[in-house]
Image (cartoon, rainbow, N blue to C red):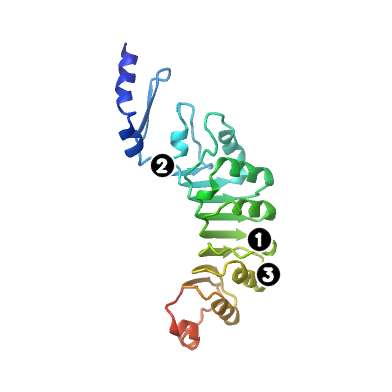
Amino acid sequence: MFQEDIYFLLNIYKSKWWLKRKRWFVEYDAHENTLITVPYFASKTFDNRYSYSFDLMQNPQIFYSNINYLTIDLHKYNEIEKILVSPLVPRPRFNNVTQLSLNGYLTTDVCDAIRNNVDLSMIKHFEFSSTVGTTEAFIELIENMTNLSSIHIQYLHSLDLFNLILSPNLSIRHLVLFDYEPTTRKQLFYHICRIFPRLTHLTTDYHSQRRLCYLLNELVHLEQLTLRLTQDQYAPNYSWIKQHNRLRMNSFEIR
């Protein structure tokens, strides 16, 4: 009788007002004698470097649908694979993720698993870091991110990646590019301007005033440029900036 009373009380909180408007979900596990609640302020972040337990949740979709920021360490892919193959949740499991971060070796199989379990059309910001060549899988992934506007790449083989991208991406407005092979910088800057002509914000390594002028002249929509300098480099001084028509005549910021 006590158990029936509990279920009666919990059913009050399963009305449309609680579920749709307040997004407050409640469940009770009689065997474990455990009450589970997932309010609207529940975690918006999933990171497979930390452990999660879904054993007590009768409806794990409540958890998945609440995640907006998904981080996957591909070195620990086995941990998240156990979750992705669970038959309890319909695909795509992560259907409200707007920011996706991947670190490590992105194989074609992993790429397929991510596409099947994450609604990539919702992704607006994508971060990727790797020292291992995973170019083809990377391109397959971002081709499905139709609403992508911001991308952060820390990838040793960035030139190989950019060489395979044939068409300009007009939706990308923010680009962060680090940790590429230094000898490829000149070619990379060319590809940045070719592939991302609508950039408004760019963060990358500083090379020279000549390369900087090239970026400023080619990226006509650029509003903010953030440069990372080595210990023996110096940023362009104010007098040099004033000489550049683009910087003198338009609203622009160099950090």
Q: Position of residue 204 (x, y in %)?
A: 55, 68
How far apart are labels 1 and 3 at the CA level? 10 Å
Count of numbered circles in the view? 3
**CB-based contact (under 8 Å), mark 1 and mark 3:** no
Farthest-out residue, top? 1
Q: Which residue does the image show at 47% across and 82% down from the upper left?
A: 247
Q: Residues within 10 Å of mark 2 (few under 14, many from 20)?
A: few
**CB-based contact (under 8 Å), mark 2 and mark 3:** no
Among numbered discs 2 and 1, the one appearing first in the sequence:
2
Q: Nearer the viewer, residue 99 or 155?
A: 99
How far apart are labels 2 and 3 at the CA level? 40 Å
Dot 1: what SS? loop
Q: Residues within 10 Å of mark 1 (few under 14, many from 20)?
A: some
User: As shown in the figure, which amino acid type bears the numbered disc 2?
Assistant: Ser
- Write down the residue under mark 2: 43
Q: Position of residue 60 (x, y in %)?
A: 47, 32
- Write down the residue under mark 1: 156
Residue 44 against residue 168 in the figure, above or below? above
Q: Which residue does the image show at 52% across and 32% down from the upper left?
A: 89
Q: Position of residue 93 (x, y in %)?
A: 52, 38
The label nearer to you, 2 versus 1, is 2
Image quadrant in which you'd find residue 1: top left
Q: Which residue does the image show at 42% across and 78% down from the upper left?
A: 251
Judged left or right of residue 105, residue 248 is left
Q: Position of residue 253 (x, y in %)?
A: 44, 75
Q: Nearer the viewer, residue 40 or 12?
A: 12
Dot 2: what SS? loop
Among numbered discs 1 and 3, the one appearing first in the sequence:
1
